[in-house]
Amino acid sequence: MRHAYAVLIMCFLALPALSREGAVTITWAEPAEPGSEVLLLIRNEEGENSVSLRSTVEPGGTALQMDLPPLPRTAQALQAGMITEGSVVLQSAIVQIADRTASDLSLALHQSLAIGFSDIWECSDGQHMRITQENGELVLRHAGVRLALSAQPDAEAGFADDAGSALHFDGNQAELTLPGQSAVTCHPTLFPPVLPLEAFAANREWRIELGLETALIDLPGLEDETLSSDGLSISAPRNGAIDISARSLSLRLTQGRCRLPDNNLIYPVSAELILHATETTLGGCAGSALDLLSGRSWYVSSLFGTVLAPNDREARAMTLQIHGGQISGRGTCNRYVGRAEVEDGRLAFRELGTTRLACPANLRNLELRFLDALEVASGFDLSRDGMLILRSGPMPILTAIRR
């Protein structure tokens, strides 16, 4: 498996709009290595892959044009990447599809956008497989199962454990065999870029904003300073951590939920800032709390402490979905939309607006209580079984699940 290293030097191309059919020109700076392939993903509103297109790349090439098929109505965004020796080495940003009036567009691939905590593979059984390298072992998570596989002396055997699980790599694909099951074929897929990203202390005494071209560093005793990102280096060996280094400090990001004591939010990344001069280590969190809520719709299961009856279709149809700083979904009768944001350590749903469909009084009252809950929400929890708990201060006001 290849380790990914990058220096933050970023640039993007202007992106015209997309049509139902057309072509995508994909470019990158360094000549492609032999055996490389380009992957183009069409993502839906929930961020999931709805169409995957793969194409081999000529060795030494720096551009490729891929034809688009008719796109499904659910298509919301595009992303491209290059895969070499089973690992994503270049990626583009995730580009939203604004409209479908132009026939062509361009996507630029960069090392800095291919920084990730793990490799993600799509398998023929419909499951995703996450792979990290931990303590000399290959750790994979597939269909809720965690396996630690060791390299076998025979190179043809790949990685295996004593229970009979095995993973064999062949270029840009892999074969996964689990005890008592048929082998499945897996291919690497893309992940959302880590950058741009904000890391901050629990008491807000330090803050680092890692942008696409600059880094803003705010430390005690140091006035806000904006540095060119080419003064920072990033290593991401796909072991669950990302190390960012500068002359005077280092920042380690670790994949895993992080909670700050002074607010009621959870963040997707833990952060550790090391000051070289004093060898001081300062803890904190990183990323956006909204990322943990984004994706598939949440279905409301209780409201202000009252569990919704399983046979009450109208009540249990109430949903919320967060995507790109926006919240939307259904009430009992109407659809709604608004802004979702985190400000000063607080969750906020603002500017909620609804359609004006006729609604029986009992359902209308329940819908108004649902919207009231969204408006007063200031934080959230995620239970071990995946339930979302919205809170107003310390008080739980709404629970929801994903089906």
Image (cartoon, rainbow, N blue to C red):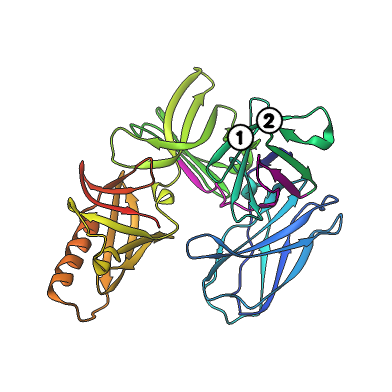
**What amino acid is at disc 2?**
Asp
The answer to which of marks 2 and 1 sits earlier in the sequence is 1
Question: Are dots 2 and 1 in contact, CB under 8 Å?
Answer: yes
- 136 in magenta: no
Q: Which residue is mark 1?
A: 147
Name the residue located 68 percent from the left edge and 26 percent from the top edge.
136
For residue 67, which quarter of the picture?
bottom right
**Quarter occupied by residue 103:** bottom right
In the rendering, which numbered label is found on residue 161?
Answer: 2
Does residue 337 appear to the left or right of 257 in the view shown? left
Whole-number angstrom distance, CA of label 2 to CA of label 1: 8 Å
Q: Residue at x 59, y 28 (%)?
A: 247
- SS for callout 1: strand
Bounds of the magenta segment: 172-198
Is 103 left or right of 241, judged from the image as shown? right
Q: Is residue 73 left or right of residue 173?
A: left
Type of amino acid at the residue the image marks with label 1? Leu
Residue 272's x, y, as percent?
48, 29
Q: Horizontal placement of 378 versus 61: left or right?
A: left
